[in-house]
Amino acid sequence: MPTPIRLEAMSKHHHRDRSWAPAPEPLPTDARVIDDHTHVASVVPFSREMNRQAIERDQPPVPVYSVDELLAQAQAVGVEGVIDVGCEYPNLGTAVQMALDHPGVVHAALAIHPNEAVLHGHRGVPGPDGLPLSYKPYHDVSFEDALARVHRLALDHPREVVAIGETGMDLFRTGEGAKELQRQAFRDHIALAKELGLPMQIHDRDSHREVIETLLADGSPERTVFHSYSGDTEMGRIAAEHGWYLSFSGTVSYKGNDGIRESARLVGLDHIMVETDAPYLSPMPYRGRTNAPYMIPYTLAALAEVFDLPVAEVARATRRTTREVYGI
């Protein structure tokens, strides 16, 4: 998950539709899929804020669903499981507990997010996004100790923790002065994924060159996944050359993202997965709404257009790849 969007900034959008998108048509029973990257627990406070803003503007109230309800809604439309990503120190245990509470449905991926990595130990530098640094009490924990907790949880819960991620680099929210600190944190995660023999999910924002350089210099884990892929066709060719996997969120449906769509074709149907990155990045035509795993069929429809194939065929391919990559 990106460092959370400042919800107060969203309040400027007076005419924003804050309601939930309608449920899509359910996927066929033989084409049920897995949300490759989501933050289900974060959907709850996000939708609570949407409800607050709606009431403040005399709009209809927005229902706030529990984690169990969100998972049930997903299963009702054919999303049979999720990989829930804990990438901030307080959320590491949350993702593992969710997997323990929902065996076979929720699987955990753990890491210290790139932007969080430099905040640990109070080493952050403001980025081009212009937002001020925001330190929390848990940032007093050193990055080394935070990563050690990721390691311990992965060892203690081998059935629940199926990936290291999201890790990588983000030079939009983190400034140039902390770039090498962020790169070193990425390298430490690469080493950990290799040590544990786990797939790695990559967060890559305004840092394509730096991420690729680091992967090639250090050697990428055998199963490397770019979550919410945002690269261009050249990056797609590099991914295809090295056998990296691309996971697509709602952004694959956005106008102007031709490079993302072409990259899907370049790596091929056997190297793509589908995700929400909920509560962010809802697919068209519901961009801007609160995202949740039940929205996956809309993104699958966009991918089906990319490959000129039936939605069910693309769904089956993503499920097969997701199960192979994560061993679930």
Image: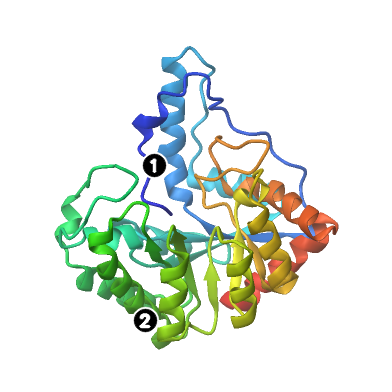
In the rendered view of the protein, which quadrant contains the C terminus?
Answer: bottom right
The colour scheme of the drawn protein is rainbow
Above or below, 214 against 275 in this view is below
Label 2 or label 1, whichever lies nearer to me, is: 1
Residue 21 can be seen, yes or no: yes
Type of amino acid under label 2:
Leu
Q: Earlier in the sequence, mark 2 or mark 1?
A: 1
Element class at badge 1: loop
Which residue is found at the position 57% from the left and 75% from the top?
326
- The residue singled out by tag 2 in the image is 192
Above or below, 116 against 4 in this view is below
Which residue is found at the position 59% from the left and 78% from the top?
327
- Residue that lies at the very extreme toward the top in this rendered image: 58
Marks 2 and 1, how far apart in space? Answer: 28 Å
The foreground one among 3 and 216 is: 216
The image's mark for residue 5 is: 1
In the rendered view of the protein, which quadrant contains the N terminus?
Answer: bottom left
